[in-house]
Structure formats: structure tokens, C-alpha cells
Image (cartoon, grey):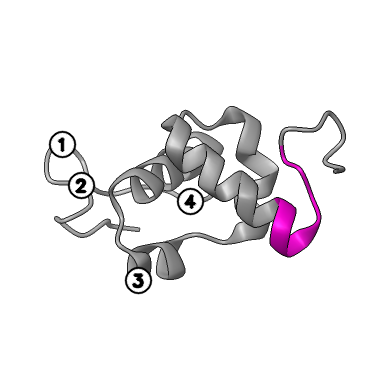
């Protein structure tokens, strides 16, 4: 996949989503730089949950998504086994 310029303005913009490292990188970029429509387009909450602990995200982004998972799905991604 190729990220649009407003998300990735320098360096390579193409990623192989079958490669776990590339998929994590795309999620980090979109969660940091993306608009709400980018998040809806590129982020799958289920996939986000599976790679949660491996992502390097700013504290405010991590807190917002943690709140989403706890409030909307009843799952705390920070918990050792994904429970609340």
C-alpha cells in the first residue's frame, strides 16, 4: 500500500501490510499524523488491539485509544490478558 503525502511526506511511502513491521509502522504513522478520515480508512481496531503493546505512540494517542477500547469494547489493552 502507498500512504498519501499528507501522512508520509518524506522517505518511502510504500508498505507491505503482510509484513508485521510494515503494518505496525503504517499504524503508528496514521495514528500520529492522520485525520479522522485516515483513521477510518487505514485503522482496523481489531488489528490495532493485536499489535497494541508493540506500537510506539505518543501518550495522548495511546490514552485516547485505550479509552476507546475500555468504553466501547470493555477491553483494557494495557491489561496483561486484554481484560478490564
Nearest to the eye among marks 3 and 1: give it: 3
Nearest to the eye among marks 2 and 1: give it: 2
Q: Residue at x 82, y 41 (%)?
A: 82
Which quarter shows the C terminus? top right
Q: Are marks 2 and 1 in contact (CB under 8 Å)?
A: yes
Q: Which label number is shown at residue 8?
A: 2
Q: Secondary structure at mark 2?
A: loop
Q: Which label number is shown at residue 11?
A: 1
Q: Position of residue 28 (x, y in %)?
A: 41, 40
Q: Quadrant of residue 38?
A: bottom left
User: Crowdedness of circle 2 by 10 Å Cα count: few (<14), some, many (20+)?
Assistant: some
Residue behind mark 4: 17
Gap in angstroms between the C-alphas marked 4 and 1: 17 Å
Marked residue nearer the N-terminal end (4 or 3): 4
Residue closer to the observer: 14 or 65? 65
Gap in angstroms between the C-alphas marked 2 and 1: 8 Å
Gap in angstroms between the C-alphas marked 3 and 2: 15 Å
Marked residue nearer the N-terminal end (3 or 2): 2
Within the magenta stretch, is there residue 84?
no
Amino acid at each position: 500500500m502507498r500512504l498519501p503525502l499528507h501522512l508520509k511526506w518524506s522517505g518511502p511511502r510504500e508498505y507491505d501490510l503482510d509484513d508485521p513491521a510494515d503494518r505496525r509502522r503504517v499504524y503508528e504513522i496514521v495514528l500520529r499524523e492522520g485525520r479522522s478520515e485516515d483513521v477510518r480508512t487505514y485503522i482496523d481496531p481489531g488489528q490495532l488491539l493485536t499489535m497494541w503493546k508493540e506500537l510506539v505512540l505518543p501518550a495522548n494517542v495511546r490514552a485516547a485509544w485505550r479509552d476507546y477500547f475500555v468504553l466501547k469494547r470493555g477491553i483494557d489493552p494495557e491489561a496483561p490478558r486484554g481484560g478490564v
